[in-house]
Image (tube, helix red, strand yellow):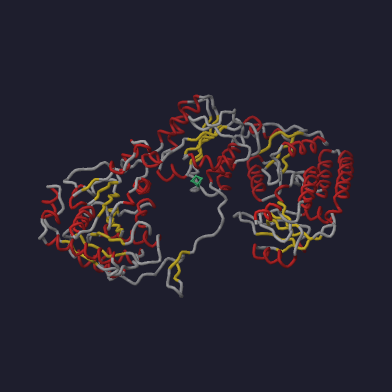
C-alpha cells in the first residue's frame, strides 16, 4: 500500500483536491481509501454525494470499546473509494491533534490496515501547530507528501511549516512529491508559488485553474473529476493521480524539501528574490558516508517529570490530598515509584485499605484528552472536598497542559465554593515545568509559604531536612535517629519533606536547629530554600554514616547542647560495638579485592573506612558523573585514590584486568568470574547503618562464587 498525505492550509481546497485525486486513482483501477484528518470533517463529503459521515472521534466518544466495528466508521463512496473521517472537538476545547492520533489508532485496532487498499490518501489540515497534526507526516503513515497552496503568503507560510514538520520526521528518504497551486486569482500568484517552490527545492506538480466547475460539482455533492471528466481541472487531477501511481511503483522520484528560514520568508512576502537559505538546522547532520541525515539529540537524563516531583513533595504531608489531573497511567507510574505510598483510585476503589497518603486521580481517558478535561477535574475536586479533604494540591500532568485545560479557573471556583479548604494549584503540566527536581522545587516554594515564622523556638526539638538515598524511610533508621538525638535529650519536630503533618509544618520554627539528612545537592538546595524563607541557620553537619562521621557528629551535637560528656560516652560505646563487628567479620574480607564505584555527588568515605578496617584491598575507587543537572561535587578524604568521570567502559576493563572479588556500585551491573555484587544504596544512617552494611557485605561474600541455578539451566 502506498500512503500519501495531502496537506494544505485550512480553506485552501485540499479536501476538494484530495477527493478528486482519490476518485481519479479509483478510476484507474486502484483500490483507494481516503481519511479526512481535519476537525471540520468534510473531506469525504464529495465522495458521498454531499453527505457527512459518522466521524471516528464521535464514534469513540459514544461507543464502548467492545461494541466498536470498522463498518460503523467507514463508508464506500464514488468509484468505490473507502471513506473515513477523524472529526474533532469544538474549536478552543480539547486537543484536535490528539484526536488524529486516536483516529489512526482506532482505525488500526478495528482492522483498517488489513483492508484491500492500494493507495491511502490522508487529507490533513496544514496548519501544523502541534505534534498531532504532524502525525500523518511520520514515516509509518506518509510515503509521499503533497502540499496544496495558493499564491497567498499565509498559504505558502503554512506549506513551509509542513516542510519543517516533515524534516522533524526524517526517515532518511525523500518524501515530497511536489506542490499543487490551487489558484485563487491573486496577481502574480503562479510566479510567487514557483519562486517559493524553487527556493524550497521541490517541483510544482500542477496548477489548478480557478473554475466554476468546482462550484457546480460541489453544489451537486460530487467531485469535478466525476461530474466533468473532460474539464481542464480533471486533466490536471488525472496527471497528479498518474504521478502518485508512478511514485508508488518507484518510477517517479521524491524530494527532500528545504524549508525557508525567516529571512527567506520575508523575501517571499516582499516579492523580492529569495536569498540562499542557511541550510539544515544545527542539530541535524548528514553522514558523509551514506548521506543519511540524522538528528543529534540532547542525551542528558531527565529524572522523571515535574508533575511527579510536585506530587511526591505534597504526598509527604500526610494530611494533604493530592489530586492528580491526568491519565491513570501517570498516576500508576508515579504511585508505584513513590516509596510507602498507597492508592485511592478515584471512583474505583481498587485498593480498599485505609491509605496512608491520599492520592486521587481524575483518570483522564482518550476522549477527555480530545474533548477537554475541565469538567472531570471539577467533579473529582468536588468529590474529594465533599469527602472531607480540606487540604488539597491539584497537580497537572502533560495531558491537560497539552490540551489547554484551564485548571487555574477550576481551582479558583472550588476555593470560592469551599472557603474553609486550602486548595493549592500546581500547574506542572507533566514535564512542561521541567524535570522531577523542578517539580519538587515548585511544590517546596508553595509548602514553605505555610511555615509560621513567628513561632518561637524551643530547646529539645530539631528539624530533619531532606530525603535520603540512605534508607531513612525504614522504621529501623528512623529509630536510630531518634536514639542518636535522645543522647542529647532532643527529638524530631518536623521531617521536612519526609512524613510530616500540616501542623508540624506550620510550627516548623519550634525546633531550635535544622539538620540535613544527607549531604547531597538536592538536600542542600532544599536547606537553602528554607534558610531563605525562615532566616534559620542549619546545623554544620548532616546525619552521619560510618564510624568516623558518627563520632564527629556526636561531638558537634555535644558541643551544641552542652552535653559533651554524654557525646564521649556514646562514642566510646559505639566504637566498642563497631570494633567488635569488624573483628568478627574481618577474616572474610582480609585481602579481598574490591571495586567501589559511586556517584560524584555522594561521599563514599564511610564505605572506604569500613572496607579498610575490614582488611579489604580497594583496587579501584571510581566516581560516575552524576546524571542530575545540578552539582556533582563531593568532598572526600580519599580524593587521591579517586578516579573521576569513571565510565561503564572503564568498569568493563577493570573487571577483566583487576579480577575483583566484590563490586560495590550504585548501578546494578552483571558481574562475572566469581565476582560478587553489592549496592551502596543499601546503607542506612548512624551507627546502625554501618553495622548493618558490614553484615550485608559479609552475607554477599558468603554467597557461592557461581550461581547454581544458572549452571543448572545451562
Ligand atoms: S511526563 Fe507526562 S505523561 Fe509522563 S508521567 Fe509525567 S505527566 Fe505523565
**Quadrant including the N terminus:** bottom left
Q: Quarter of the image holding residue 407?
A: top left
Q: Position of residue 267 (x, y in %)?
A: 30, 67
Q: Which residue does the image show at 37% across and 53% down from the upper left? A: 135
- In the rendered structure, the answer to whether residue 425 lies left or right of residue 154 reads right
Residue 167 in the image: state x and y as whole percent.
38, 62
Give the quarter of the image for residue 229. bottom left
Along the line of sight, which residue is nearer the eye, 661 or 18? 661
Judged from this view, the residue extending furthest toward the bottom is 289
Looking at the image, residue 353 lies above or below residue 440: above
Taking 285 as reference, is 466 above or below it?
above
Give the quadrant of residue 373. top left
Apparent side of residue 70 relative to residue 317 in the rendered image (left or right): left
- The answer to whether residue 226 shows anywhere in this view is yes
In this view, 180 is above or below 97? below
Residue at image coords 64%, 48%: 522
Observer able to see residue 635: no
Residue 565, percent across and down?
A: 89, 40
Q: Position of residue 259 (x, y in %)?
A: 34, 65
Quadrant location, the C terminus = bottom right
Amino acid at each position: 500500500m502506498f500512503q500519501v498525505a495531502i496537506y494544505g492550509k485550512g480553506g485552501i481546497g485540499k479536501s476538494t483536491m484530495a477527493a478528486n485525486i482519490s476518485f481519479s486513482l479509483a478510476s484507474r483501477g486502484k483500490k483507494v481509501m481516503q481519511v479526512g484528518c481535519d476537525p471540520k470533517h468534510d473531506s469525504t463529503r464529495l465522495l458521498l454525494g454531499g453527505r457527512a459521515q459518522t466521524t471516528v472521534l464521535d464514534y469513540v466518544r459514544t461507543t464502548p470499546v467492545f461494541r466498536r466495528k470498522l463498518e460503523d466508521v467507514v463508508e464506500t463512496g464514488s468509484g468505490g473509494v473507502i471513506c473515513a473521517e477523524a472529526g474533532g472537538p469544538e474549536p478552543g476545547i480539547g486537543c484536535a491533534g490528539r484526536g488524529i492520533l486516536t483516529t489512526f489508532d482506532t482505525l488500526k485496532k478495528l482492522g483498517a490496515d488489513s483492508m484491500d487498499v492500494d493507495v491511502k490518501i490522508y487529507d490533513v489540515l496544514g496548519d501544523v501547530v502541534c505534534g498531532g497534526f504532524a502525525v500523518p507526516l511520520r514515516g509509518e503513515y506518509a510515503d509521499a507528501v503533497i502540499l496544496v497552496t495558493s499564491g497567498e503568503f499565509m498559504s505558502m507560510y503554512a506549506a513551509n511549516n509542513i516542510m519543517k514538520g516533515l524534516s522533524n520526521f526524517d526517515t532518511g528518504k525523500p518524501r515530497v512529491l511536489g506542490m499543487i497551486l490551487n489558484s485563487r486569482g491573486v496577481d502574480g500568484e503562479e510566479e510567487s508559488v514557483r519562486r517559493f517552490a524553487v527556493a524550497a527545492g521541490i517541483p510544482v506538480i500542477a496548477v489548478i485553474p480557478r473554475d466554476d466547475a468546482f462550484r457546480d460539482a460541489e453544489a451537486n455533492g460530487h467531485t469535478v473529476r466525476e461530474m466533468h471528466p473532460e474539464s481542464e481541472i480533471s486533466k490536471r487531477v488525472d496527471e497528479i493521480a498518474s504521478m502518485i501511481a508512478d511514485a508508488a511503483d518507484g518510477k517517479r522520484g521524491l524530494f527532500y524539501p528545504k524549508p525557508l528560514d525567516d529571512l527567506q520568508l520575508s523575501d517571499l512576502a516582499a516579492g523580492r528574490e529569495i536569498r540562499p537559505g542557511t541550510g539544515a538546522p544545527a542539530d541535524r547532520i548528514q553522514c558523509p558516508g551514506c548521506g543519511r541525515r540524522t538528528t543529534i539529540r540532547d542525551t542528558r537524563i531527565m529524572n522523571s517529570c515535574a508533575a511527579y516531583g510536585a506530587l511526591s513533595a505534597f504526598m509527604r504531608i500526610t494530611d494533604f490530598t493530592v489530586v492528580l489531573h491526568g491519565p491513570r497511567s501517570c498516576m500508576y507510574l508515579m504511585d508505584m515509584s513513590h516509596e510507602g505510598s498507597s492508592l485511592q483510585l478515584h471512583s474505583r476503589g481498587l485498593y480498599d485499605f485505609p491509605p496512608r497518603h491520599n492520592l486521587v486521580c481524575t483518570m483522564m481517558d482518550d476522549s477527555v484528552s480530545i474533548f477537554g478535561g475541565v469538567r472531570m477535574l471539577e467533579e473529582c475536586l468536588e468529590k474529594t472536598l465533599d469527602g472531607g479533604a480540606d487540604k488539597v494540591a491539584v497537580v497537572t500532568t502533560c495531558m491537560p497542559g497539552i490540551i489547554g485545560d484551564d485548571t487555574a479557573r477550576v481551582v479558583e471556583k472550588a476555593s470560592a465554593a469551599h472557603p474553609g479548604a486550602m486548595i493549592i494549584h500546581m500547574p506542572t503540566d507533566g514535564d512542561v515545568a521541567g524535570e522531577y527536581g523542578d517539580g519538587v522545587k515548585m511544590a517546596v516554594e508553595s509548602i514553605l509559604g505555610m511555615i509560621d515564622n513567628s513561632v518561637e523556638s524551643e530547646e529539645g526539638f530539631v528539624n530533619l531536612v531532606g530525603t535520603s538515598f540512605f534508607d531513612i524511610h525504614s522504621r529501623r533508621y528512623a529509630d536510630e535517629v531518634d536514639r542518636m538525638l535522645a543522647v542529647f535529650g532532643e527529638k524530631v519536630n518536623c521531617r521536612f519533606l519526609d512524613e510530616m503533618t500540616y501542623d508540624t509544618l506550620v510550627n516548623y520554627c519550634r525546633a531550635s536547629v535544622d539538620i540535613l539528612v544527607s549531604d547531597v545537592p538536592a538536600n542542600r538546595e532544599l536547606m537553602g530554600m528554607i534558610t531563605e524563607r525562615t532566616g534559620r541557620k542549619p546545623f554544620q553537619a548532616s546525619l552521619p554514616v560510618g564510624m568516623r562521621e558518627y563520632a564527629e557528629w556526636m561531638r558537634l551535637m555535644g558541643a551544641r547542647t552542652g552535653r559533651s560528656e554524654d557525646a564521649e560516652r556514646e562514642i566510646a560505646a559505639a566504637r566498642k560495638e563497631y570494633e567488635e563487628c569488624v573483628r568478627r567479620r574481618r577474616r572474610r574480607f582480609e585481602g579481598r579485592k574490591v571495586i567501589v564505584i559511586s556517584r560524584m555527588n555522594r561521599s563514599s568515605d564511610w564505605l572506604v573506612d569500613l572496607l579498610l578496617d575490614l582488611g579489604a584491598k580497594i583496587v579501584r575507587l571510581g566516581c560516575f558523573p552524576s546524571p542530575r543537572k545540578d552539582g556533582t561535587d563531593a568532598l572526600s578524604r580519599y580524593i587521591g585514590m579517586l578516579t573521576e568521570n569513571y565510565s561503564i567502559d572503564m568498569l568493563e576493563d577493570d573487571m577483566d584486568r583487576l579480577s575483583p572479588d566484590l563490586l560495590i556500585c550504585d548501578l546494578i551491573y552483571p558481574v562475572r568470574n566469581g565476582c560478587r555484587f553489592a549496592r551502596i544504596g543499601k546503607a542506612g544512617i548512624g551507627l546502625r547503618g554501618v553495622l548493618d552494611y558490614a553484615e550485608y557485605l559479609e552475607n554477599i561474600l558468603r554467597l557461592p562464587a557461581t550461581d547454581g541455578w544458572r549452571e543448572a539451566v545451562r
